[in-house]
Amino acid sequence: MATVTGAEHPREAPGPILGIETSCDETAAALLAPDGTVLAEALFSQHEEHLPYAGVVPEIAARAHLARLPAMVARVLEGQPAPAAVAATVGPGLIGGLVVGAGYAKGFALARGIPFLAINHLEAHALSPRLPMLGAPPDFPYLTLLVSGGHCLLAETGGPGDHALLGTTLDDAPGEAFDKVAKMLGLGWPGGPAIEALAKEGDAARFGLPRPMLGKRGCDFSFSGLKTAVAVIASGYPDGALPRRDAADLAAGFQASAAASLADRAGRAMAAFIERHGHAATLVVSGGVAANGAIRAALAAVCARHGFALAAPPIRLCTDNAVMVAWAAIERLRAGLAADGMDAAPRPRWPLGEAA
Ligand code: KG4
Ligand code: ZN
């Protein structure tokens, strides 16, 4: 086997990279080898803590990150080679959690005299399909569709630090709409999986729900009109108690409209991409909502129409995790981007495509 020298790979990460994720309600740490192999990983979902409130409570999330992160990092590092750099999500997200993760990572970097990388959570999602464990990576540039409880965007991903935002939501994120509609229908939280399960028994056409943004110019999204349409129908039932049949039809209709809307927006981005580059590429879909089978099917159909490949990382890498944070750091180091200073502050808002 040929020896790989530093000269041939001048920008390889200098050693294992520790990644930390605390931007929402997942506390996570992961150690990746410079080639992206996962050496160790720990992830804790705080769902139980937030369940009584049917939504993420920022203060509870921050305290839970603080209580668990140090022990999780210790577990990940046990018996492993020492990290050569540490990367943490510094935005966008809930400020309390970002302060915990970024503060911890900076302290770790200072104590060990290793570099610190401030990672944009959206970039980490966007680069995650290039993890080597997922097989042949999509080449840059590709289209990224990020759909979760807190995020909704379409972007052209040209490489680490190179993202052009094509569209974003004008109101709710799709996962947020799934969660709110689930609440109206008396389903549990998070709402996405509950709606998907109930929709299987439903008639999507019965209530004639609107299909937001269909055919509209650009690649922006909107879900509040669709959500309101469901609310108006649900409020017509005495005490808000819907017969199962009606709830199933509403769930199916809502899901079909959301899927059609996402596919329409992605289709427009693909057409524009082909106009810009003269060829099709890959659509990467990430975020918790990418778990939805109807949405995946709608995206697969629109990709096929435009000659695009569809890349959807497995769900555990689609939802928040620290593997993608460490991987984003590896990609950035490989691209020759510099590590960050200790003055890189947590950023609750940090649009994709803006420098740290
Ligand atoms: O990425 P994620 O775990 O956390 C962030 O929001 O960052 O996404 C969670 C969101 C929730 O709103 C949840 O309802 C939604 O993803 N979700 C789904 C499904 N599974 C999770 N939405 C639709 N269908 C699903 N099967
Ligand atoms: Zn996320």
Image: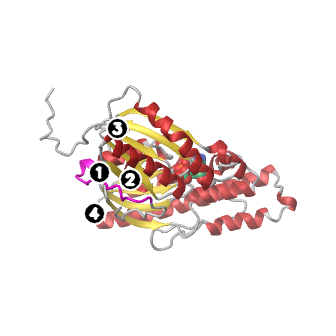
User: Which stretch is magenta?
Assistant: 333-346
Query: Which residue is identified by label 2?
Result: 119
**Residue type for callout 2:** Ile
- Crowd around label 1: few <14 · some 14–19 · many ≥20 (10 Å): many
Q: CA distance from mark 2 to mark 1?
A: 9 Å
- Which sits earlier in the primary sequence, circle 2 or circle 3? 2
Q: Tell me residue 55's x, y (percent).
A: 65, 53
- Which sits earlier in the primary sequence, circle 1 or circle 3? 3
Asked whether 191 falls inside the magenta stretch, the response is no
Tag 2 near tag 1, CB within 8 Å? yes
Quarter-of-image position of residue 354 = bottom left
- Which sits earlier in the primary sequence, circle 2 or circle 4? 2
Query: Which residue is identified by label 1?
Result: 332
* Front disc: 3 or 4: 3
Query: Which residue is identified by label 4?
Result: 278
> Residue drawn 82% across and 59% down?
240
* Front disc: 2 or 3: 2
* Front disc: 1 or 3: 1
Q: Tell me residue 114's x, y (percent).
A: 30, 43
SS label for mark 2: strand
* Any part of residue 356 in sight: yes
- Which sits earlier in the primary sequence, circle 3 or circle 4? 3
* Front disc: 2 or 4: 2
Q: CA distance from mark 2 to mark 3?
A: 24 Å
Q: Tell me residue 300's x, y (percent).
A: 47, 51
Asked whether 265 or 107 is in front, the reply is 107
SS label for mark 4: loop
**Residue type for callout 4:** Gly
